[in-house]
Image: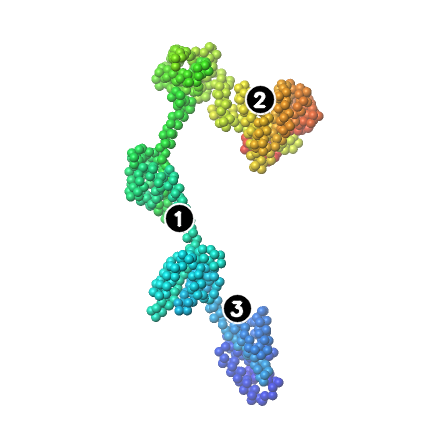
C-alpha cells in the first residue's frame, strides 16, 4: 500500500510527460533502489519541494522521528537554516548541483552537522525534481572542533610559556611552525616557510654559529641547544631566544628536525641589569669605609667580602677567603659568649647586632659594630649569612670624651651641673641627711672686667683646687655655673659641724694668692640648707640654698646664712630664669598658645591672640607673669617679641599651605619695642619672607604706649598701619590714655579689660556704663571692640545686647596649643561652654 502511494507521488514527476507505465515503473524502481541502498540518506523532492521518496529508516535513525512530509522536516530545519535550505534548493532548480552544510538539533536536542547535496533531476532537458543527499558529518566535525580546540590550547600554552614549536623537513626546505612561533618573530602566519626566512632576522654576530648548529643537525644528526638574538620583524625589537632542536631519522639518515624556541628576553635583560647593578653595588661596597660580607652559612666560607673589611681587619681579603676562621680568631675572648647568643638567634631566623673588640692584623685594638642577617629558604633553612661591619673605635673614644665633658666641667675638672643634679636626685631617694653649701665668689666680675677672662679662669681653677683640698671625707664638690660652686656634705654629727666648716672655707678662700704676678684677694658667700628637713627634692633644696646665699650677700658678703621657709618666687629661680632666658630662643623652649576670638552674634571664628609660654628645662611651664617682667628689665623682651612676630608669620604660612582658613592673629608688642629701631623693617621682612598679607597681623599695644608716645614711636605705628598691620589698644580703661592720643593714631580696635567684664553680673552701674560708653565711642570712631575675659553666659548676653563686636574668653575657649587651635580653625566657629 505504501509502495502504491509512493508510486503515485513519484508518478507526479511525469504528469506532463508522455511515458508509458512500464517506463514510469522502471524510473520508480530506480529511485526507490537509490534511496534505499545509497550509503547516505537520499530524499527525492519534486520541484515544488514535496517529498516523493526517502529512506525513512535512516532518516528516523538520524533525527529520532519518522519524516512523512516537508512539514515534519521543517521542525528540524528552522531559522536561518530554512533560508539556506530554500536558497540552495532554488539555485539547484537552475540546473546546477549545489551544496551547503548546516547544524541542526535532533529530537534528543543533540547537535548534528550535515552536508546537503542538491542534484537536479533532468528529463528531456527539463528539471522535474531534485535529489537531496544528506551526509552526516557530525563525528568528523566534532573531531575537527576538538582538534582546533587542542590547537588553540597549545597556542595559548605556548604564549603563556613564551615558546614556539617548529618542524623542519630537510629535502623540501619546509619549515612548519606554530602560531606563537610566528608571533615571537613578528612574521605573518603561513602554512610553511623556508628556513631562510627566520634566519634573515638573526643578529649578525649570532648568524654564523646558528648556521653551524643547523648544518651539524642536517648532516651529522646532532641535537643542539643554543641562545641566539633575533630582531622582531615588525617592531625591530631585539629578542633573546633559546633554541632547542632534536633530529628525527628516517632509514638511518637525518630527515627532519623538531624543535622549540623560548623567549628569554625578559630574563636575559633582567640578568644583565642585575649584573650591572651587582657591579655597581660591588663598586659602592668596595668604596665604603664599612665592610660588607656574605657567607654560605654560619661560620662557612666567604662568598663575598668588600675591600672595606681589608682596612678594618688589617689583613688581606685573600686570607678571609682561604681561612674562614681568621676573623673569629681576632675577637677578644670576653665577647665570644655574646657571639654564641647571636648564632642562636640566627638559627631561629633572627638578625642580631653587637659591639665587640678585636686585635687587628697590625695588633691594634679596635671596636667594631656588626649587624648580621640570615637568609632563609621556604623551609626555614639558612642559605646565606649577610653582614655589615663598621669600625667605631673613634666613636667609642669620642663617646668616652663626650661622657666626660657632659658630666665634668672642662675648666676645673669638677662635676658639672648635670652631674650635680643626678647626684642630688640619687641622694634624695634615701633618708640619709646631708647639707648643701652654695658658694659664690664675691665681686668676681671685677676680676674678669679688670684683669681679663684668662685671669678669671685661672682664679676659678685655683679656687676649685683649694676647695678640693679641704673637702670633708665622702663629700661632693661641683661647679654649678660661672663662679658658683655646690658642695654636698654627708656623715656629719651635728649641723654645727657644717657651720664650722663653712667658716673654715670662708677663711681659706680669703687667703691671698698670685696669678701671673697679680696678688689676688677674694672672698666667698655661702648659703646652706639641710636635707630632709628643709626640702626633699632637688629644686627645693637648691632654691633654699640660693635664698640663703642671697641673704649672705645682702648682709655684706664674706659670710654664710641658713635657708628660710620663704615660699615666694625665690631669688634662685629668678636667677635661673634670667640666666637661661638668653638661650631659650635658640633652644626652642618658647612656644605659642592661641586664644580664639569669635563674633558675638554667631560664634564665628574671626581672630586669635598669640600668647607665649616658656617650657623651662628645670622649672617646667613658666607663666608669662614670671618671665615677661624680667625680660622687660633685661631688654630680652625685644628679641622675644621679634621671635613671636616671625613665629606667627611662619605659622600663618604653614596653615595657608595646609588649606586652613587663616584669620588675623594678635600679638602683644610692649612699649620698649616701639622705642627700639628696626621694628617696622623686621615686620616687613617677615611678611615678605613668608608671603603673608599684612591684614592677618594685629599688634596690641597698652595704654601706656599711647601715654608716652613720642614722635619716633608714632612714626613706627603709622608706618605699620600704612603697611596694612592693624593696631589694637589692649586693656582699655585701666590706664591713662587720652582721647587725643586715640584720635591721633586711630587704632582699628579697642579691647575692654577683664576687670570691667567681671563686674557685669554684679549689676555695677559704673562698670556697665563704662562698657556701654566704650562701645558707643568705638562705633562713633569706626573701631571694633573686643571684650576680654568673658567667662559667663550672662556676660555674653549683656555684651551681645549692647552690640559688642568680638568676644575673647574662657566661655568659648582657653588659650590652646597650636594643634588644638588648628582643629578650631577647621571648624570655623565655637559655641559657649555653659557649665
Crowd rating for badge 2 (residues with CA inside 10 Å; few <14, some 14–19, many 20+):
few
The image position of residue 28, as x and y in percent, is 55, 84
The image position of residue 613, as x and y in percent, is 53, 26
**Near-viewer residue (294 or 554):** 294
**Near-viewer residue (158 or 437):** 158
Total numbered labels placed on residues in the image: 3
In this picture, is 101 found above or below 803?
below
- Secondary element under disc 1, as helix, strand or loop, is helix
Whichever of callouts 3 and 1 sits on the residue coming sooner in the sequence is 3
Q: Which residue is at 39% across, 14% downward?
A: 516
Alpha carbons under labels 3 and 1: distance apart: 63 Å
**Near-viewer residue (435 or 635):** 635
Q: Residue 275 carries which label?
A: 1
Image quarter where the C terminus lies is top right
Q: Which mark is residue 676?
A: 2
* Residue that protrudes farthest toward the right in the picture: 780
Give the image quarter of residue 252: bottom left
The image position of residue 219, as x and y in percent, is 35, 66
The image position of residue 42, as x and y in percent, is 53, 78
Image quarter where the N terminus lies is bottom right
Give the image quarter of residue 541: top left
Q: Which mark is residue 109?
A: 3
Crowd rating for badge 3 (residues with CA inside 10 Å; few <14, some 14–19, many 20+):
few
Amino acid at each position: 500500500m505504501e509502495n502504491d502511494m509512493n508510486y503515485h507521488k513519484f508518478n507526479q514527476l511525469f504528469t506532463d510527460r508522455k511515458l508509458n507505465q512500464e517506463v514510469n515503473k522502471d524510473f520508480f524502481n530506480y529511485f526507490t533502489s537509490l534511496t534505499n541502498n545509497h550509503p547516505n540518506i537520499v530524499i527525492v523532492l519534486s520541484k515544488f519541494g514535496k517529498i516523493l521518496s526517502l529512506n525513512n529508516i535512516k532518516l528516523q535513525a538520524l533525527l529520532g522521528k519518522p519524516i512523512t512530509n516537508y512539514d515534519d522536516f521543517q521542525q528540524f530545519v528552522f531559522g536561518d537554516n530554512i533560508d539556506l535550505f530554500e536558497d540552495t534548493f532554488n539555485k539547484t532548480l537552475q540546473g546546477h548541483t549545489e551544496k551547503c552544510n548546516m547544524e541542526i538539533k535532533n529530537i534528543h536536542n543533540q547537535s548534528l552537522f550535515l552536508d546537503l547535496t542538491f542534484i537536479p533531476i533532468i528529463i528531456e532537458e527539463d528539471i522535474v525534481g531534485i535529489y537531496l543527499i544528506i551526509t552526516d558529518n557530525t563525528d568528523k566535525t566534532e573531531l575537527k572542533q576538538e582538534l582546533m580546540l587542542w590547537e588553540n590550547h597549545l597556542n595559548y600554552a605556548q604564549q603563556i610559556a613564551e615558546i614556539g614549536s617548529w618542524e623542519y623537513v630537510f629535502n623540501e626546505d619546509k619549515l612548519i611552525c606554530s602560531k606563537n612561533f610566528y608571533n615571537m618573530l613578528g612574521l605573518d602566519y603561513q602554512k610553511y616557510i623556508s628556513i631562510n626566512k627566520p634566519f634573515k632576522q638573526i643578529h649578525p654576530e649570532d648568524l654564523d654559529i646558528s648556521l653551524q648548529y643547523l648544518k651539524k643537525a642536517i648532516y651529522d644528526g646532532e641535537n643542539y641547544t643554543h641562545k641566539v638574538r633575533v630582531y622582531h620583524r615588525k617592531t625591530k625589537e631585539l629578542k633573546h631566544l633559546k633554541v632547542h632542536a632534536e633530529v628525527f631519522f628516517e632509514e638511518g639518515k637525518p630527515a627532519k628536525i623538531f624543535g622549540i624556541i623560548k623567549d628569554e628576553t625578559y630574563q636575559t635583560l633582567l640578568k644583565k641589569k642585575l649584573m650591572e647593578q651587582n657591579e655597581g653595588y660591588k663598586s659602592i661596597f668596595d668604596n665604603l669605609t664599612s665592610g660588607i660580607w656574605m657567607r654560605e652559612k654560619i661560620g662557612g666560607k666567604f662568598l663575598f667580602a668588600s675591600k672595606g673589611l681589608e682596612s678594618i681587619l688589617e689583613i688581606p681579603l685573600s686570607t678571609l677567603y682561604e681561612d674562614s676562621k681568621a676573623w673569629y680568631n681576632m675577637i677578644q675572648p670576653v665577647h665570644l659568649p655574646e657571639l654564641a647568643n647571636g648564632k642562636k638567634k640566627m638559627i631561629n631566623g633572627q638578625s642580631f647586632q653587637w659591639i665587640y673588640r678585636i686585635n687587628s692584623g697590625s695588633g691594634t685594638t679596635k671596636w667594631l659594630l656588626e649587624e648580621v642577617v640570615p637568609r632563609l629558604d621556604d623551609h626555614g633553612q639558612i642559605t646565606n649569612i649577610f653582614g655589615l661591619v663598621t669600625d667605631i673605635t673613634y666613636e667609642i673614644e669620642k663617646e668616652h670624651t663626650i661622657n666626660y665633658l657632659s658630666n665634668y666641667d672642662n675648666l676645673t675638672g669638677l662635676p658639672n651641673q648635670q652631674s650635680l643634679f643626678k647626684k642630688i636626685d640619687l641622694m634624695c631617694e634615701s633618708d640619709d641627711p646631708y647639707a648643701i653649701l652654695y658658694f659664690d665668689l664675691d665681686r668676681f666680675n671685677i676680676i674678669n672686667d679688670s684683669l681679663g677672662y684668662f685671669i678669671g679662669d685661672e682664679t676659678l681653677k685655683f679656687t676649685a683646687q683649694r676647695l678640693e683640698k679641704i673637702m670633708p671625707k665622702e663629700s661632693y664638690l661641683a661647679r654649678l655655673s660661672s663662679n658658683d660652686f655646690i658642695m654636698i656634705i654627708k656623715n656629719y654629727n651635728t649641723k654645727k659641724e657644717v657651720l664650722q666648716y663653712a667658716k673654715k672655707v670662708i677663711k681659706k678662700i680669703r687667703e691671698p694668692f698670685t696669678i701671673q704676678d697679680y696678688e689676688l684677694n677674694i672672698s666667698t658667700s655661702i648659703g646652706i640648707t639641710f636635707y630632709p628637713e628643709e626640702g626633699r627634692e632637688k629644686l627645693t633644696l637648691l632654691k633654699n640654698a640660693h635664698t640663703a646665699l642671697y641673704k649672705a650677700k645682702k648682709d655684706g658678703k664674706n659670710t654664710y646664712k641658713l635657708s628660710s621657709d620663704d615660699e615666694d618666687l625665690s631669688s634662685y629661680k629668678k636667677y635661673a630664669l634670667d640666666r637661661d632666658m638668653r638661650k631659650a630662643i635658640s633652644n626652642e623652649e618658647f612656644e605659642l598658645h592661641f586664644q580664639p576670638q569669635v563674633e558675638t552674634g554667631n560664634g564665628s571664628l574671626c581672630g586669635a591672640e598669640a600668647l607665649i609660654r616658656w617650657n623651662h628645662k628645670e622649672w617646667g611651664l613658666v607663666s608669662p607673669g614670671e618671665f615677661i617682667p624680667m625680660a622687660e628689665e633685661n631688654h630680652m623682651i625685644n628679641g622675644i617679641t621679634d621671635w613671636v612676630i616671625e613665629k606667627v608669620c611662619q605659622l600663618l604660612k604653614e596653615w595657608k599651605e595646609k588649606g586652613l582658613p587663616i584669620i588675623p592673629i594678635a600679638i602683644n608688642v610692649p612699649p620698649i619695642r616701639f622705642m627700639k629701631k628696626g621694628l617696622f623693617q623686621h615686620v616687613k621682612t617677615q611678611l615678605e619672607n613668608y608671603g603673608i598679607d599684612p591684614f592677618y597681623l594685629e599688634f596690641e599695644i597698652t595704654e601706656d604706649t599711647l601715654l608716652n608716645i613720642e614722635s619716633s614711636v608714632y612714626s613706627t605705628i603709622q608706618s605699620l598701619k600704612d603697611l596694612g598691620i592693624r593696631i589694637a589698644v589692649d586693656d582699655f580703661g585701666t590706664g591713662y590714655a587720652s582721647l587725643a592720643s586715640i584720635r591721633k593714631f586711630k587704632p582699628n580696635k579697642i579691647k575692654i579689660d577683664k576687670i570691667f567684664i567681671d563686674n557685669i553680673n554684679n549689676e555695677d552701674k559704673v562698670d556697665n556704663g563704662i562698657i556701654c560708653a566704650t562701645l558707643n565711642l568705638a562705633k562713633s570712631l569706626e573701631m571694633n571692640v573686643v571684650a576680654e575675659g568673658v567667662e559667663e553666659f550672662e556676660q555674653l548676653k549683656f555684651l551681645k545686647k549692647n552690640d559688642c563686636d568680638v568676644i575673647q574668653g574662657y566661655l568659648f575657649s582657653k588659650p590652646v596649643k597650636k594643634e588644638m587651635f588648628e582643629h578650631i580653625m577647621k571648624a570655623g566657629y565655637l559655641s559657649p561652654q555653659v557649665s
